Amino acid sequence: VIDIRKLYGQANVFTYDPGFTSTAACDSSITYIDGDVGELLYRGYPIEQLAEKSHHLEVCYLLLYGELPNAAQMKDFEGRVTRHTMLHEQIQYFFRGFRRDAHPMATMVGVVGALSSFYHDSLDINDPWQREVAAIRMIAKLPTIAAWAYKYSIGQPFVYPKNALSYAGNFLHMCFAVPCEDYVVQPALERAMDRIMMLHADHEQNASTSTVRLAGSSGANPFACIAAGIACLWGPAHGGANQACLEMLKEIGSVDRIPEYIAKAKDKTSGFRLMGFGHRVYKNFDPRAKVMKESADEVLDLLGVHDNPLLQVAKELERIALEDDYFVQKKLYPNVDFYSGIILEAMGFPTSMFTPIFALSRTVGWISQWKEMIGDPQQKIGRPRQLYVGPTRRDYTDVRHR
Ligand code: ACO
């Protein structure tokens, strides 16, 4: 690793690296990925162990503070998060201002950005205590915002948080409870939801996290930074891939049509890529995809859904692609988004909610990275350079002579 600042000092020399494929922009002690072996560690702990033994709020604590909490610390943290799950009552007017058919991600970008107009006390980023309050507020409120964006889109009344429930259980409750009926969160679905949240909680310097850091590097307030992260996540090459992937699996429809789509993905002129396949860092299995695949089997079994055609198409697509020279040579494997949509749809979520669920799960990662950056004495405003390829100096000509 070469520290370019030491190498070139203040000289006007820089590297050209579109897409930052080989440029590190920060130090971080939060998440480690070894893309060659397919390893993902949160603060040193393997994702597989966390997905099996931990729960999302514990992972939030781990990502934010660096260590697993003891029982008293966990209880205190849960208390602090649940105290902030409500939204200011006036925030409802923001939701009501959107068209009903707005994508929930559009609503979330707007509402999360608008939080900065409600929580003025969280805007002083130089005060470590206010940074802490902002972090807790964001982790607590994002599930409420995502659930309300969903409720609004289907014309149902907003459901207030129920703090006796777990983080994942409360989110399911706010999405699926209706005032005229009792709603009991199924423990198996709650566990599956919680696992999805843990698997998405952080992934080092991906596009949306880098966006949060870049926005934060100018001193922008944390709500504005997270809104920027949500906007970036929406793209189909990033978090939007889970929606795009399920839509693709539906379009394929049956296993006999898979070869046609594999051929299309290999044809550079088609503009088509296999959604949920490939990753900038993983050149091996994405460990999250493995857990997600097992989870998909479990959830569908628990729901009594056998021979789910989408799961069959997904598994067969994976099998065929992994035996195909194109995918083998380019080291393209299923990523986290490949199986998550199947689980979420089985739970009752429409595809438009897949990326908002990713966003609310990733919030802790974004805010942990933001806090790390603000607390780093080496931190500077992010400011990439460019290679200018436009016209050289020329003189202005009057409109009559053009
Ligand atoms: N289907 C077909 N070919 C692919 C795919 C794919 N899904 N992904 C990459 N390739 C090919 C590219 O065409 C390219 O081929 P070339 O070298 O012949 O030009 C090569 O593999 C490398 O691809 P790049 O786009 O250069 O790789 P990059 O690291 O920039 O992109 C990305 C990674 C964006 C994830 C890409 O693999 C992709 O578009 N995948 C589909 C979308 C997706 O699933 N995104 C979710 C990522 S995970 C997440 O954000 C949570």
Image (tube, helix red, strand yellow):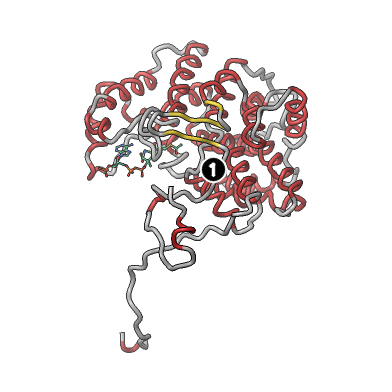
The amino acid sitting under disc 1 is: Met
Of the pair 392 and 313, the residue shown nearer to us: 392
Ligand 1, by image quadrant, is top left
User: Where's residue 26, x and y in %?
Assistant: 53, 49
**Dot 1 alpha-carbon crowd within 10 angstroms: few under 14, some 14 to 19, many 20 or more:** many
User: As displayed, is residue 92 above or below residue 38?
Assistant: below
User: Where's residue 296, x and y in %?
Assistant: 46, 19
Of the pair 67 and 294, the residue shown nearer to us: 67
Residue at 58% of width from left, 42% of height from top?
Answer: 366
Left or right, 216 with reference to 249: right
Left or right, 143 with reference to 298: right
Residue at 67% of width from left, 41% of height from top?
Answer: 138
Residue at 44% of width from left, 41% of height from top?
Answer: 238
Q: Quadrant of the C terminus?
A: bottom left
Of the pair 159 and 207, the residue shown nearer to us: 207
User: Where's residue 62, x and y in %?
Assistant: 64, 31
**Which residue does the numbered mark 1 point to in the structure image?**
105
Residue 284 sits in quarter = top left
User: Where's residue 374, x and y in %?
Assistant: 64, 51
Q: Is mark 1 within 8 Å of ligand 1?
A: no
Of the pair 254 and 133, the residue shown nearer to us: 133
Numbered-mark total: 1
User: As displayed, is residue 194 above or below residue 120?
Assistant: above
Left or right, 320 with reference to 294: left
Q: Secondary structure at mark 1?
A: helix
User: As displayed, is residue 78 above or below residue 393?
Assistant: above
